[in-house]
Image (spheres, grey):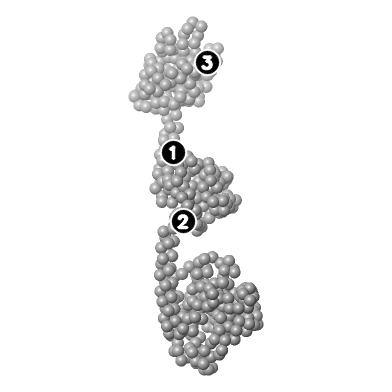
Amino acid sequence: MKDTFYLNISTADALGIGLFKYSLFPQEKFIITNSTLAHILGYQSKNELKKEKWDSLFLNPQDKDVFLQTLRKEGKVKFFETLFKTKENKSIWVAITASKVLTKTQHEYLEGIIENISAHKDTQEILSIERNLLQSLLDNIPDAIYFKDHLNRIIKVNKFYTQGIGLKSEEIIGKTDYDFFPNEQAKQMFEDDNQVLRTGSPIIGKIEHTLLPNGTWNQVITTKIPIYDQKGKIIGTMGMTRDITAYANLEKERRAMLINALKVLGKALEMRDPYTFSHTRHVASIAERIGKALNWSEDRLLGMRLAGELHDLGKIGIPLDILNKPGNLSDLEYLLIQEHVKKCYDLIKDIQFPFPLAETIYQHHERLDGSGYPRQLSNNEILLEAKILAVSDVLEAVTHYRPYREALGIKKAQEELEKGKGSKYDKTVVDIAIDLINKNGEEVFWLND
């Protein structure tokens, strides 16, 4: 038995673990220690350490009391973390694993092991500081930050996220977007998360409309990136969502101001030439109806309608006696008329819009076969918006009165579009226009818009 004990002491020394046996009753004293324990506590030898009392090793008396209470209640203590004093009265973190032993002669002993965990505690403290610093950083970012696992369950959020949801962090962790957002919205969020998990490619700057728990809608921009473990495996996602509602509203106001300013020019055209103004308004309605049939977004429809309303704005600089000439135009006069697309383009080209307004107007007299003007563009060189504007322009112009001829009617306009379908005019656009005509009993459908 003695050989076995010394073998344990030898093994403990090799592993850097302090080994001890301490008498609690009838006399308190160390019976056995190993060299490692003496070294951990800063003593030169085992014999020097044996002069110390168990109580004197604890830096905090409260820790000693808790340790002894646990020992008496359960008969053992496992990995009890506390601060010990070294011989030089420095503090070190140790972990005690010990058992109480009562002999037949009523001797009471405490025996076990002591490990120096200061390095571990220092690492824990550093990690704790880093975690607190990260959390503080996240909580001071004015964006919703959230982390999800591979099942899209939320595992961490920042303060801004909890404020937006209106719940405490512990009420959010472990749940999914389906617990906070409408079904269709949550479904799209899940699809985005799964796309990042599946491909490893981030989703950057996605514009979304979000319904908040308080019933209000906001506009946000979201970025989602994959999270990897140490082996490079994707284990979740991190998302950042910024509320851009105020910015979006400001942009809408700014855009509205620009549009209103351009419409003022349209009003000036109306005062100068009521016929051209009514024509552009009708063309805008036709173009918008075609765009809706193509399931375009609200922004794209706005650009399409605005292009229709402004496409003849360049005619404001053409003399009225040429613009409304009842007879045939001379070659020079016709060239002057053609200049209206370039004049309008130059007028608005430097104004920033989220749609190709100036270029659409510049191209609306181009034709698929290259026979149009002013640049003889063809096929895919022409914007789809310009192709729609071209069809809308022809449909309205042929149907109604022109200064140089009487109105030819909608059937004649339909014939013109069918004749040029695929050669001058885009086939899909023409088909949509013809379908709109047929659905309205071959009547002028755009006057009621």
For residue 244, which quarter of the picture?
Answer: bottom left
Residue at x-position 41% and y-position 28%: 93
Q: Position of residue 296 (x, y in %)?
A: 56, 67
Q: In this rendered view, identify the residue nearer to me: 402 or 10.
A: 402
Query: Is residue 190 among what the camera can see?
Result: yes
Furthest residue to the left? Answer: 89
Per the image, the residue denoted by label 3 is: 5
Q: How many marks?
A: 3
How far apart are the alpha carbons under marks 1 and 2? 37 Å
Per the image, the residue denoted by label 2 is: 218
Furthest residue to the top? Answer: 105
Q: Position of residue 149 (x, y in %)?
A: 55, 44
Question: Residue 78, relative to residue 197: is it above or below?
Answer: above
Three-letter amino acid code at the position of disc 1: Leu
Per the image, the residue denoted by label 1 is: 127
Q: Position of residue 242 (x, y in %)?
A: 45, 54
Q: Which quadrant does the N terminus fall into?
A: top right
Q: Is residue 434 left or right of residue 39?
A: right
Query: Is residue 369 among what the camera can see?
Result: no
Q: Is residue 176 left or right of residue 417?
A: left
Q: In this rendered view, identify the residue nearer to me: 15 or 302.
A: 302
How far apart are the alpha carbons under marks 3 and 1? 39 Å
